[in-house]
Protein backbone atom coordinates (compact mmCIF):
# COMPACT_ATOMS: atom_id res chain seq x y z
CA UNK A 1 0.00 0.00 0.00
CA UNK A 2 1.13 3.51 -0.70
CA UNK A 3 1.30 6.38 1.71
CA UNK A 4 -1.39 8.98 1.13
CA UNK A 5 -0.67 11.30 4.02
CA UNK A 6 2.83 11.84 5.35
CA UNK A 7 3.48 14.24 8.17
CA UNK A 8 6.96 14.70 9.59
CA UNK A 9 7.89 16.83 12.55
CA UNK A 10 4.91 19.14 12.26
CA UNK A 11 4.78 22.18 14.54
CA UNK A 12 2.00 24.71 14.64
CA UNK A 13 1.78 27.76 16.87
CA UNK A 14 -1.24 30.03 17.11
CA UNK A 15 -0.70 33.77 17.45
CA UNK A 16 3.11 33.54 17.59
CA UNK A 17 5.09 36.25 19.38
CA UNK A 18 2.11 37.62 21.29
CA UNK A 19 0.89 37.02 24.80
CA UNK A 20 -1.80 34.75 23.35
CA UNK A 21 0.80 32.40 21.84
CA UNK A 22 -0.29 28.79 22.04
CA UNK A 23 1.49 25.69 20.81
CA UNK A 24 -1.32 23.85 19.02
CA UNK A 25 0.72 20.97 17.56
CA UNK A 26 4.24 19.87 18.28
CA UNK A 27 6.48 17.25 16.78
CA UNK A 28 3.72 15.34 15.01
CA UNK A 29 4.75 12.36 12.89
CA UNK A 30 1.96 10.56 11.13
CA UNK A 31 1.61 8.31 8.10
CA UNK A 32 -1.69 7.16 6.63
CA UNK A 33 -1.84 4.41 4.04
CA UNK A 34 -4.08 4.52 0.99
CA UNK A 35 -7.54 3.15 1.75
CA UNK A 36 -6.98 3.23 5.49
CA UNK A 37 -9.63 4.17 8.03
CA UNK A 38 -7.80 6.19 10.65
CA UNK A 39 -9.36 7.56 13.79
CA UNK A 40 -7.93 10.50 15.71
CA UNK A 41 -9.04 10.77 19.31
CA UNK A 42 -8.02 12.99 22.17
CA UNK A 43 -9.44 15.21 24.90
CA UNK A 44 -10.83 18.65 24.05
CA UNK A 45 -8.17 21.10 22.94
CA UNK A 46 -5.67 18.36 22.13
CA UNK A 47 -5.25 19.64 18.56
CA UNK A 48 -7.39 17.13 16.66
CA UNK A 49 -9.30 19.66 14.59
CA UNK A 50 -6.16 21.70 13.97
CA UNK A 51 -4.38 18.61 12.67
CA UNK A 52 -7.31 17.98 10.34
CA UNK A 53 -7.11 21.58 9.11
CA UNK A 54 -3.42 21.13 8.39
CA UNK A 55 -4.17 17.99 6.35
CA UNK A 56 -6.83 19.96 4.46
CA UNK A 57 -4.28 22.65 3.60
CA UNK A 58 -6.19 25.31 5.53
CA UNK A 59 -3.60 25.85 8.25
CA UNK A 60 0.10 25.99 7.56
CA UNK A 61 2.57 24.63 10.06
CA UNK A 62 6.30 24.04 10.13
CA UNK A 63 7.52 20.66 8.98
CA UNK A 64 6.76 18.31 6.12
CA UNK A 65 3.15 17.66 5.19
CA UNK A 66 2.52 15.67 2.01
CA UNK A 67 -1.06 14.77 1.07
CA UNK A 68 -1.70 12.65 -2.01
CA UNK A 69 1.74 13.50 -3.36
CA UNK A 70 1.27 17.25 -2.89
CA UNK A 71 3.73 19.11 -0.69
CA UNK A 72 1.50 21.45 1.30
CA UNK A 73 4.25 23.91 2.08
CA UNK A 74 3.66 25.20 -1.46
CA UNK A 75 0.75 27.56 -1.85
CA UNK A 76 -0.20 26.32 -5.31
CA UNK A 77 -0.52 22.79 -3.94
CA UNK A 78 -2.73 23.92 -1.07
CA UNK A 79 -4.96 25.67 -3.61
CA UNK A 80 -5.72 22.58 -5.65
CA UNK A 81 -5.96 20.21 -2.71
CA UNK A 82 -9.71 20.76 -2.32
CA UNK A 83 -10.33 18.88 -5.55
CA UNK A 84 -8.94 15.70 -4.01
CA UNK A 85 -9.66 16.04 -0.31
CA UNK A 86 -13.18 16.33 1.09
CA UNK A 87 -13.54 17.88 4.50
CA UNK A 88 -16.61 17.61 6.66
CA UNK A 89 -16.35 20.07 9.52
CA UNK A 90 -18.15 20.09 12.82
CA UNK A 91 -21.77 21.04 12.20
CA UNK A 92 -21.34 21.10 8.41
CA UNK A 93 -24.96 22.22 8.01
CA UNK A 94 -23.68 25.73 8.74
CA UNK A 95 -22.12 25.82 5.28
CA UNK A 96 -25.45 25.47 3.42
CA UNK A 97 -26.35 28.61 1.53
CA UNK A 98 -27.86 27.94 -1.90
CA UNK A 99 -31.54 28.38 -2.72
CA UNK A 100 -32.24 24.69 -3.19
CA UNK A 101 -30.85 21.44 -1.88
CA UNK A 102 -29.86 20.40 -5.40
CA UNK A 103 -27.91 23.58 -6.06
CA UNK A 104 -26.15 23.43 -2.74
CA UNK A 105 -24.90 19.92 -3.37
CA UNK A 106 -23.90 20.98 -6.89
CA UNK A 107 -21.85 23.94 -5.59
CA UNK A 108 -18.61 21.98 -5.14
CA UNK A 109 -18.83 20.04 -8.43
CA UNK A 110 -19.63 23.29 -10.27
CA UNK A 111 -16.47 24.85 -8.88
CA UNK A 112 -14.59 21.84 -10.27
CA UNK A 113 -15.65 22.91 -13.78
CA UNK A 114 -17.23 19.58 -14.68
CA UNK A 115 -19.70 19.09 -17.52
CA UNK A 116 -23.36 19.59 -16.61
CA UNK A 117 -24.13 15.90 -17.16
CA UNK A 118 -21.33 14.89 -14.85
CA UNK A 119 -22.50 17.39 -12.21
CA UNK A 120 -26.01 16.01 -12.41
CA UNK A 121 -24.80 12.44 -12.11
CA UNK A 122 -22.65 13.23 -9.10
CA UNK A 123 -25.29 15.27 -7.29
CA UNK A 124 -27.92 12.57 -7.75
CA UNK A 125 -25.51 9.83 -6.68
CA UNK A 126 -24.43 11.77 -3.59
CA UNK A 127 -27.99 12.54 -2.53
CA UNK A 128 -28.92 8.90 -3.02
CA UNK A 129 -26.06 7.87 -0.75
CA UNK A 130 -27.31 10.09 2.06
CA UNK A 131 -30.89 8.96 1.42
CA UNK A 132 -32.42 12.27 0.37
CA UNK A 133 -34.97 11.54 -2.34
CA UNK A 134 -35.88 13.59 -5.40
CA UNK A 135 -38.82 15.20 -3.63
CA UNK A 136 -36.28 17.21 -1.58
CA UNK A 137 -34.24 18.51 -4.55
CA UNK A 138 -36.10 21.82 -5.07
CA UNK A 139 -36.52 22.57 -1.35
CA UNK A 140 -34.56 25.26 0.40
CA UNK A 141 -31.89 23.55 2.52
CA UNK A 142 -33.09 25.61 5.48
CA UNK A 143 -36.51 23.97 5.32
CA UNK A 144 -34.96 20.58 6.09
CA UNK A 145 -34.73 19.11 9.57
CA UNK A 146 -31.42 19.19 11.46
CA UNK A 147 -30.53 15.61 10.54
CA UNK A 148 -31.47 16.17 6.91
CA UNK A 149 -29.38 19.34 6.79
CA UNK A 150 -26.40 17.39 8.09
CA UNK A 151 -26.88 14.78 5.38
CA UNK A 152 -27.30 17.47 2.73
CA UNK A 153 -24.01 19.07 3.75
CA UNK A 154 -22.27 15.68 3.66
CA UNK A 155 -23.71 15.05 0.19
CA UNK A 156 -22.21 18.39 -0.89
CA UNK A 157 -18.76 16.99 -0.08
CA UNK A 158 -19.37 13.47 -1.44
CA UNK A 159 -20.53 14.91 -4.78
CA UNK A 160 -16.98 16.13 -5.30
CA UNK A 161 -15.87 12.48 -5.16
CA UNK A 162 -12.76 13.06 -3.07
CA UNK A 163 -9.97 10.49 -2.74
CA UNK A 164 -9.49 11.39 0.88
CA UNK A 165 -12.17 12.22 3.41
CA UNK A 166 -11.41 14.23 6.53
CA UNK A 167 -14.24 13.99 9.03
CA UNK A 168 -14.46 16.20 12.12
CA UNK A 169 -17.06 14.64 14.42
CA UNK A 170 -19.52 14.11 11.57
CA UNK A 171 -22.17 12.45 13.73
CA UNK A 172 -22.11 14.76 16.77
CA UNK A 173 -25.65 15.71 17.76
CA UNK A 174 -27.42 13.14 15.59
CA UNK A 175 -29.80 10.49 16.91
CA UNK A 176 -28.54 6.89 17.22
CA UNK A 177 -29.99 5.75 13.93
CA UNK A 178 -28.68 8.81 12.10
CA UNK A 179 -25.22 8.15 13.54
CA UNK A 180 -25.34 4.53 12.47
CA UNK A 181 -26.44 5.37 8.93
CA UNK A 182 -23.84 8.06 8.40
CA UNK A 183 -21.03 5.94 9.83
CA UNK A 184 -22.12 2.96 7.72
CA UNK A 185 -21.94 5.19 4.67
CA UNK A 186 -18.41 6.37 5.47
CA UNK A 187 -17.25 2.83 6.25
CA UNK A 188 -18.68 1.58 2.97
CA UNK A 189 -16.97 4.36 1.02
CA UNK A 190 -13.68 3.45 2.66
CA UNK A 191 -13.98 -0.33 2.27
CA UNK A 192 -15.60 -0.54 -1.17
CA UNK A 193 -14.22 2.50 -2.96
CA UNK A 194 -10.93 2.69 -1.15
CA UNK A 195 -11.39 6.28 0.02
CA UNK A 196 -8.81 7.05 2.67
CA UNK A 197 -10.74 8.25 5.71
CA UNK A 198 -9.58 10.24 8.71
CA UNK A 199 -12.16 10.46 11.47
CA UNK A 200 -11.96 12.76 14.46
CA UNK A 201 -14.40 11.45 17.03
CA UNK A 202 -15.30 11.37 20.70
CA UNK A 203 -17.41 8.27 20.25
CA UNK A 204 -15.16 5.39 21.28
CA UNK A 205 -17.59 2.67 20.18
CA UNK A 206 -17.59 4.22 16.72
CA UNK A 207 -13.79 4.29 16.68
CA UNK A 208 -13.51 0.72 17.97
CA UNK A 209 -15.85 -0.66 15.33
CA UNK A 210 -14.68 1.25 12.30
CA UNK A 211 -11.03 2.25 12.51
CA UNK A 212 -8.01 0.32 11.26
CA UNK A 213 -5.68 2.41 13.33
CA UNK A 214 -6.07 4.98 16.07
CA UNK A 215 -3.95 8.03 16.82
CA UNK A 216 -4.35 9.53 20.28
CA UNK A 217 -3.47 13.20 20.64
CA UNK A 218 -2.80 14.89 23.95
CA UNK A 219 -1.69 18.52 24.37
CA UNK A 220 -0.75 18.76 20.70
CA UNK A 221 1.46 15.67 20.70
CA UNK A 222 0.93 12.09 19.58
CA UNK A 223 0.24 10.26 22.83
CA UNK A 224 -0.30 6.77 21.40
CA UNK A 225 -0.77 5.10 18.07
CA UNK A 226 -1.85 1.61 17.12
CA UNK A 227 -4.76 -0.60 16.20
CA UNK A 228 -7.92 -0.20 18.34
CA UNK A 229 -7.19 -3.42 20.29
CA UNK A 230 -3.80 -2.16 21.41
CA UNK A 231 -4.97 1.35 22.19
CA UNK A 232 -8.05 0.41 24.19
CA UNK A 233 -6.14 -2.21 26.17
CA UNK A 234 -4.34 0.73 27.79
CA UNK A 235 -7.48 2.03 29.46
CA UNK A 236 -5.66 3.39 32.50
CA UNK A 237 -3.39 5.60 30.43
CA UNK A 238 -6.36 6.83 28.41
CA UNK A 239 -8.31 7.56 31.58
CA UNK A 240 -5.45 9.72 32.81
CA UNK A 241 -5.92 12.12 29.89
CA UNK A 242 -9.70 12.04 30.25
CA UNK A 243 -10.67 9.47 27.62
CA UNK A 244 -12.92 6.48 28.09
CA UNK A 245 -12.69 3.11 26.33
CA UNK A 246 -15.45 1.11 24.62
CA UNK A 247 -17.53 -1.14 26.85
CA UNK A 248 -15.95 -4.37 25.57
CA UNK A 249 -12.44 -3.06 26.22
CA UNK A 250 -13.41 -1.96 29.71
CA UNK A 251 -14.76 -5.45 30.35
CA UNK A 252 -11.59 -7.11 29.06
CA UNK A 253 -9.35 -4.78 31.06
CA UNK A 254 -11.38 -5.42 34.24
CA UNK A 255 -11.28 -9.20 33.77
CA UNK A 256 -7.56 -9.08 33.14
CA UNK A 257 -7.04 -7.17 36.39
CA UNK A 258 -8.76 -10.05 38.17
CA UNK A 259 -6.24 -12.46 36.74
CA UNK A 260 -8.23 -13.84 33.84
CA UNK A 261 -6.36 -14.40 30.62
CA UNK A 262 -8.32 -12.61 27.95
CA UNK A 263 -7.55 -11.08 24.57
CA UNK A 264 -7.76 -7.38 23.90
CA UNK A 265 -11.36 -6.59 23.04
CA UNK A 266 -13.00 -3.69 21.32
CA UNK A 267 -16.34 -4.93 20.01
CA UNK A 268 -19.26 -6.67 21.64
CA UNK A 269 -19.07 -9.60 19.23
CA UNK A 270 -15.51 -10.31 20.37
CA UNK A 271 -16.55 -9.87 23.98
CA UNK A 272 -19.30 -12.44 23.60
CA UNK A 273 -16.87 -14.96 22.16
CA UNK A 274 -14.18 -14.41 24.77
CA UNK A 275 -16.56 -14.43 27.72
CA UNK A 276 -18.07 -17.63 26.35
CA UNK A 277 -14.61 -19.14 26.23
CA UNK A 278 -13.91 -18.06 29.82
CA UNK A 279 -17.16 -19.64 30.98
CA UNK A 280 -15.88 -23.01 29.83
CA UNK A 281 -16.26 -23.43 26.15
CA UNK A 282 -19.98 -22.72 26.19
CA UNK A 283 -21.14 -20.52 23.37
CA UNK A 284 -22.31 -17.12 24.47
CA UNK A 285 -25.10 -17.19 21.97
CA UNK A 286 -28.08 -19.34 22.84
CA UNK A 287 -30.95 -19.46 20.44
CA UNK B 1 -7.33 40.20 14.61
CA UNK B 2 -10.20 38.30 16.19
CA UNK B 3 -9.21 39.42 19.66
CA UNK B 4 -8.92 43.13 19.01
CA UNK B 5 -11.42 44.50 21.47
CA UNK B 6 -11.54 41.89 24.15
CA UNK B 7 -11.08 42.63 27.80
CA UNK B 8 -7.59 41.62 28.84
CA UNK B 9 -7.29 40.75 32.46
CA UNK B 10 -4.23 42.32 34.08
CA UNK B 11 -3.56 43.77 37.47
CA UNK B 12 -2.89 47.45 36.86
CA UNK B 13 -3.93 50.85 38.12
CA UNK B 14 -5.70 51.51 34.80
CA UNK B 15 -7.80 48.36 35.24
CA UNK B 16 -8.84 49.52 38.72
CA UNK B 17 -10.04 52.94 37.59
CA UNK B 18 -13.74 53.53 37.35
CA UNK B 19 -15.01 52.96 33.77
CA UNK B 20 -16.45 56.47 33.86
CA UNK B 21 -13.06 58.12 34.30
CA UNK B 22 -11.55 55.95 31.57
CA UNK B 23 -14.41 56.88 29.27
CA UNK B 24 -13.92 60.55 30.14
CA UNK B 25 -10.23 60.14 29.34
CA UNK B 26 -10.92 58.51 25.96
CA UNK B 27 -13.44 61.21 25.05
CA UNK B 28 -11.03 63.88 26.29
CA UNK B 29 -8.28 62.48 24.08
CA UNK B 30 -10.69 62.64 21.16
CA UNK B 31 -11.49 66.31 21.84
CA UNK B 32 -7.78 67.12 22.16
CA UNK B 33 -6.98 65.25 18.94
CA UNK B 34 -9.62 67.22 17.10
CA UNK B 35 -8.54 70.54 18.62
CA UNK B 36 -5.01 70.51 17.22
CA UNK B 37 -3.62 69.74 13.79
CA UNK B 38 0.07 70.31 14.45
CA UNK B 39 1.80 66.93 14.06
CA UNK B 40 4.07 67.61 17.07
CA UNK B 41 1.13 68.23 19.37
CA UNK B 42 -0.62 65.14 18.05
CA UNK B 43 2.51 63.03 18.39
CA UNK B 44 2.82 64.12 22.02
CA UNK B 45 -0.82 63.16 22.56
CA UNK B 46 -0.28 59.76 20.92
CA UNK B 47 2.74 59.11 23.13
CA UNK B 48 0.73 60.03 26.22
CA UNK B 49 -1.98 57.56 25.18
CA UNK B 50 0.71 54.93 24.60
CA UNK B 51 2.07 55.56 28.10
CA UNK B 52 -1.40 55.02 29.58
CA UNK B 53 -1.58 51.78 27.62
CA UNK B 54 1.82 50.74 28.98
CA UNK B 55 0.67 51.49 32.52
CA UNK B 56 -2.33 49.28 31.83
CA UNK B 57 0.07 46.59 30.52
CA UNK B 58 -1.98 46.00 27.38
CA UNK B 59 0.30 47.55 24.73
CA UNK B 60 1.88 44.21 23.86
CA UNK B 61 -1.54 42.77 23.03
CA UNK B 62 -2.46 45.81 20.97
CA UNK B 63 0.83 45.91 19.04
CA UNK B 64 -0.65 43.90 16.16
CA UNK B 65 -3.50 46.38 15.79
CA UNK B 66 -1.07 49.29 16.02
CA UNK B 67 0.93 47.87 13.13
CA UNK B 68 -2.24 47.67 11.04
CA UNK B 69 -3.19 51.22 12.04
CA UNK B 70 0.21 52.63 11.07
CA UNK B 71 -0.13 51.10 7.61
CA UNK B 72 -3.55 52.74 7.38
CA UNK B 73 -2.03 56.04 8.55
CA UNK B 74 0.62 55.77 5.86
CA UNK B 75 -2.11 55.33 3.25
CA UNK B 76 -3.76 58.50 4.62
CA UNK B 77 -0.51 60.42 4.13
CA UNK B 78 -0.17 59.11 0.58
CA UNK B 79 -3.76 60.03 -0.23
CA UNK B 80 -3.12 63.58 1.00
CA UNK B 81 0.01 63.85 -1.12
CA UNK B 82 -1.82 62.65 -4.23
CA UNK B 83 -5.08 64.56 -3.87
CA UNK B 84 -4.25 67.70 -1.86
CA UNK B 85 -4.31 70.89 -3.89
CA UNK B 86 -1.42 72.94 -2.64
CA UNK B 87 2.17 72.73 -1.59
CA UNK B 88 3.74 69.30 -1.24
CA UNK B 89 5.08 70.07 2.24
CA UNK B 90 1.68 71.13 3.45
CA UNK B 91 0.10 67.95 2.10
CA UNK B 92 2.58 65.73 3.91
CA UNK B 93 2.14 67.61 7.20
CA UNK B 94 -1.63 67.45 6.90
CA UNK B 95 -1.49 63.74 6.06
CA UNK B 96 0.76 62.98 9.03
CA UNK B 97 -1.54 64.97 11.30
CA UNK B 98 -4.57 63.01 10.08
CA UNK B 99 -2.79 59.71 10.49
CA UNK B 100 -1.64 60.54 14.01
CA UNK B 101 -5.10 61.78 14.96
CA UNK B 102 -6.71 58.58 13.76
CA UNK B 103 -4.18 56.41 15.61
CA UNK B 104 -4.55 58.43 18.81
CA UNK B 105 -8.33 58.23 18.93
CA UNK B 106 -8.48 54.54 18.02
CA UNK B 107 -5.74 53.58 20.46
CA UNK B 108 -7.34 55.46 23.35
CA UNK B 109 -10.61 53.58 22.84
CA UNK B 110 -8.78 50.27 22.49
CA UNK B 111 -6.99 50.91 25.78
CA UNK B 112 -10.33 51.81 27.37
CA UNK B 113 -12.06 48.65 26.06
CA UNK B 114 -9.21 46.27 26.80
CA UNK B 115 -8.83 47.44 30.40
CA UNK B 116 -12.54 47.59 31.26
CA UNK B 117 -15.03 44.78 31.58
CA UNK B 118 -18.19 45.13 29.50
CA UNK B 119 -20.47 44.63 32.44
CA UNK B 120 -18.81 47.52 34.27
CA UNK B 121 -19.19 49.77 31.24
CA UNK B 122 -22.87 48.87 31.04
CA UNK B 123 -23.21 49.55 34.74
CA UNK B 124 -21.82 53.09 34.69
CA UNK B 125 -23.57 54.02 31.46
CA UNK B 126 -26.95 53.03 32.84
CA UNK B 127 -26.55 53.92 36.50
CA UNK B 128 -24.35 57.01 36.40
CA UNK B 129 -25.11 58.39 32.94
CA UNK B 130 -28.79 57.32 33.13
CA UNK B 131 -28.85 55.93 29.58
CA UNK B 132 -31.66 53.43 28.89
CA UNK B 133 -30.46 49.93 29.71
CA UNK B 134 -31.90 48.26 26.60
CA UNK B 135 -29.86 50.40 24.25
CA UNK B 136 -26.68 50.19 26.26
CA UNK B 137 -27.06 46.44 26.46
CA UNK B 138 -27.72 46.18 22.72
CA UNK B 139 -24.65 48.22 21.86
CA UNK B 140 -22.32 46.42 24.25
CA UNK B 141 -23.59 43.00 23.20
CA UNK B 142 -22.93 43.70 19.55
CA UNK B 143 -19.40 44.81 20.44
CA UNK B 144 -18.94 41.67 22.49
CA UNK B 145 -20.03 39.51 19.55
CA UNK B 146 -17.46 40.90 17.11
CA UNK B 147 -14.72 38.37 18.01
CA UNK B 148 -17.22 35.49 17.97
CA UNK B 149 -18.46 36.64 14.60
CA UNK B 150 -14.94 36.86 13.14
CA UNK B 151 -14.21 33.36 14.39
CA UNK B 152 -17.42 32.12 12.81
CA UNK B 153 -16.40 33.83 9.54
CA UNK B 154 -13.12 31.92 9.52
CA UNK B 155 -14.89 28.60 10.09
CA UNK B 156 -17.48 29.15 7.37
CA UNK B 157 -14.74 30.46 5.07
CA UNK B 158 -12.83 27.21 5.54
CA UNK B 159 -15.92 25.13 4.87
CA UNK B 160 -16.57 26.93 1.58
CA UNK B 161 -12.90 26.93 0.61
CA UNK B 162 -12.80 23.13 0.65
CA UNK B 163 -15.79 23.18 -1.68
CA UNK B 164 -13.72 25.24 -4.09
CA UNK B 165 -15.11 28.68 -3.26
CA UNK B 166 -12.73 31.05 -5.10
CA UNK B 167 -12.23 33.49 -2.20
CA UNK B 168 -8.56 34.01 -2.98
CA UNK B 169 -9.10 34.43 -6.70
CA UNK B 170 -7.57 37.53 -8.24
CA UNK B 171 -10.68 38.58 -10.13
CA UNK B 172 -12.60 41.07 -7.92
CA UNK B 173 -15.98 40.22 -9.44
CA UNK B 174 -15.53 36.48 -8.80
CA UNK B 175 -14.26 37.32 -5.34
CA UNK B 176 -17.41 39.32 -4.56
CA UNK B 177 -19.63 36.50 -5.74
CA UNK B 178 -17.56 34.02 -3.76
CA UNK B 179 -18.17 35.99 -0.58
CA UNK B 180 -21.91 35.41 -0.83
CA UNK B 181 -21.23 31.78 0.05
CA UNK B 182 -19.63 32.97 3.29
CA UNK B 183 -21.84 35.97 4.06
CA UNK B 184 -25.17 34.21 3.76
CA UNK B 185 -24.44 31.42 6.26
CA UNK B 186 -22.94 34.04 8.58
CA UNK B 187 -26.11 36.12 8.57
CA UNK B 188 -28.19 33.03 9.28
CA UNK B 189 -25.89 31.91 12.08
CA UNK B 190 -26.02 35.39 13.62
CA UNK B 191 -29.80 35.52 13.47
CA UNK B 192 -30.02 32.13 15.11
CA UNK B 193 -27.57 33.22 17.77
CA UNK B 194 -29.51 36.40 18.47
CA UNK B 195 -32.72 34.45 18.78
CA UNK B 196 -31.16 31.95 21.17
CA UNK B 197 -29.67 34.76 23.23
CA UNK B 198 -33.07 36.46 23.42
CA UNK B 199 -34.72 33.26 24.62
CA UNK B 200 -31.96 32.58 27.14
CA UNK B 201 -32.33 36.11 28.51
CA UNK B 202 -36.09 35.98 28.72
CA UNK B 203 -36.02 32.69 30.59
CA UNK B 204 -33.91 34.48 33.16
CA UNK B 205 -36.39 37.31 33.48
CA UNK B 206 -34.88 40.00 31.28
CA UNK B 207 -37.00 43.14 31.23
CA UNK B 208 -39.52 41.82 33.73
CA UNK B 209 -38.75 44.23 36.52
CA UNK B 210 -36.57 47.09 37.65
CA UNK B 211 -32.92 46.13 37.50
CA UNK B 212 -30.85 46.18 40.60
CA UNK B 213 -27.10 45.76 40.69
CA UNK B 214 -24.96 43.55 42.85
CA UNK B 215 -21.86 45.62 42.33
CA UNK B 216 -21.68 49.35 42.99
CA UNK B 217 -18.82 50.90 41.01
CA UNK B 218 -16.64 52.89 43.38
CA UNK B 219 -15.55 56.36 42.35
CA UNK B 220 -12.25 56.80 44.14
CA UNK B 221 -10.25 59.97 44.75
CA UNK B 222 -8.03 58.92 41.87
CA UNK B 223 -11.07 58.83 39.58
CA UNK B 224 -12.07 62.35 40.59
CA UNK B 225 -8.48 63.40 39.93
CA UNK B 226 -8.47 61.80 36.46
CA UNK B 227 -11.78 63.42 35.50
CA UNK B 228 -10.57 66.78 36.88
CA UNK B 229 -7.34 66.42 34.87
CA UNK B 230 -9.25 65.64 31.68
CA UNK B 231 -11.47 68.71 32.15
CA UNK B 232 -8.42 70.91 32.84
CA UNK B 233 -6.65 69.57 29.75
CA UNK B 234 -9.65 70.21 27.54
CA UNK B 235 -10.06 73.79 28.83
CA UNK B 236 -6.31 74.33 28.47
CA UNK B 237 -6.38 72.98 24.93
CA UNK B 238 -9.22 75.30 23.95
CA UNK B 239 -7.35 78.29 25.40
CA UNK B 240 -4.18 77.31 23.51
CA UNK B 241 -6.17 76.86 20.36
CA UNK B 242 -7.79 80.29 20.71
CA UNK B 243 -4.33 81.81 21.06
CA UNK B 244 -3.42 80.08 17.80
CA UNK B 245 -1.01 77.49 19.23
CA UNK B 246 -0.85 73.93 17.91
CA UNK B 247 -2.67 74.91 14.73
CA UNK B 248 -1.16 75.13 11.31
CA UNK B 249 -2.51 77.63 8.84
Image: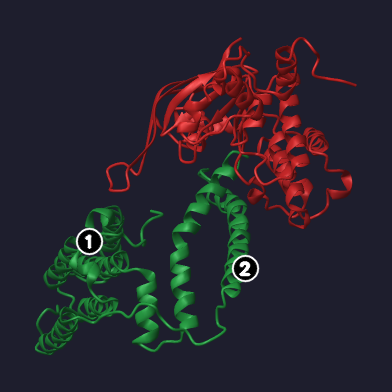
Chain colours: A red, B green
Residue B140 percent location from the top left of the image: 43, 72
Q: Is residue A21 above or below residue A62?
A: below
Horizontally, residue B52 falls left or right of residue A154, namely left
User: For residue A122, which quarter of the picture?
Assistant: top right
The crowd level at tag 1 (other Cα within 10 Å; few <14, some 14-19, many 20+) is few
Picture coordinates of residue A194 (x, y %)?
A: 70, 19
Could you say where residue B90 lies in the image, as x and y percent from the top left?
A: 18, 70
Determine which of the numbered discs, if any, sits on residue B11 in the image.
1
Q: Chain of mark 1?
A: B
Residue at point 59% right, 27% down?
A: A39
- A234 and A132: which one is in front? A234
Where disc 1 sits, the SS reads loop
- Tell me the residue at 47%/84% (across/down): B211
Residue closest to the eye, B30 or B109 = B109
Q: Considering the numbered disc 2 on the image, is that residue within a helix, a strand or a loop?
A: helix
Q: Residue beneath label 2, please? A: B195
Parent chain of label 2? B
Determine whether A16 is above or below B152 in the image.
Answer: above
Q: Position of residue A46 (x, y in %)?
A: 45, 36
Determine if marks 1 and 2 fall on one subunit.
yes
Amino acid sequence: MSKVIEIENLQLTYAPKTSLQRQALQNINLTVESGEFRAIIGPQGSGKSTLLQVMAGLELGLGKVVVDGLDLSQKKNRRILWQRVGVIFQQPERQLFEDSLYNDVAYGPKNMALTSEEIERRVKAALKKVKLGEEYYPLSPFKLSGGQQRRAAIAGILAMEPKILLLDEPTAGLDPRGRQEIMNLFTELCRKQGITTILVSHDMEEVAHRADKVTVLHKGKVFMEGCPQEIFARGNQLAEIGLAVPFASELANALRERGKSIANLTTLVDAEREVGRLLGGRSGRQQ
Amino acid sequence: MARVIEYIYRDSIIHQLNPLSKLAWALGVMVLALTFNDPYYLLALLISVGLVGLTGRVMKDLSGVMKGLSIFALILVLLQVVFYHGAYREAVTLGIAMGLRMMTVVLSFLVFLSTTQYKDIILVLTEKMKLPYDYVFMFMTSLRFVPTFLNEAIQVGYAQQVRGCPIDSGNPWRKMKAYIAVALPLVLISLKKAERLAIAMETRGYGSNNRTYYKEPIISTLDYFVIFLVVVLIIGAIILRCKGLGVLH
